[in-house]
Image (cartoon, rainbow, N blue to C red):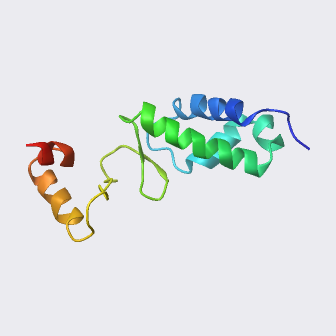
Amino acid sequence: MSAGVSKAKLSKAMLEILIQLPDGTANLKETIVHHLGLLGQMSPTRDITAAWNATKKKTAREYSDRFVLGARGVLHWNDGSVKVVDKKISSANFTMLNELAEAENCSVNQLVSK
């Protein structure tokens, strides 16, 4: 039994709820599904999961000042506690390069382009 709502509309509703949540709210997915009400209860789990994955990516891209998408695809609040590590270089050098960029108070891209 389905509520007849597309994943795109479900994702849009999730995004609208997510940007209204107060900073530091825990268990974002569960909180959002709860706020969806009957729509969240009637939607199949696979639709909710697909919409949540799309919402996470869109949120991290559009609201990068508030949210960060971690290495494992987990959405975190952008409070400085989660550091996204640049992994597009060799495994022997990426940690040292990120530490150097942090010491210089700039991004890895800015450090490499100097």
Point out residue 105 in the picture as x, y percentages from the top left corner. 12, 46
Q: Residue at x 64, y 48 (%)?
A: 30
Where the C terminus falls, by quadrant? top left
Left or right of 50 on screen, residue 2: right
Q: Is residue 96 above or below residue 64?
A: below
Q: Residue at x 15, y 52 (%)?
A: 102
Q: Residue at x 49, y 53 (%)?
A: 74
Point out residue 26 in the picture as x, y percentages from the top left corner. 52, 49
Q: Is residue 90 above or below residue 27?
A: below
Q: Please give the count of numbered marks on the rendered protein.
A: 0
Q: Quadrant of residue 35?
A: top right
Q: Residue at x 63, y 35 (%)?
A: 14
Left or right of 1 on screen, residue 29: left
Where the N terminus falls, by quadrant? top right
Q: Is residue 81 above or below residue 57?
A: below
Point out residue 111 in the picture as x, y percentages from the top left corner. 12, 47
Q: Quadrant of residue 32?
A: top right
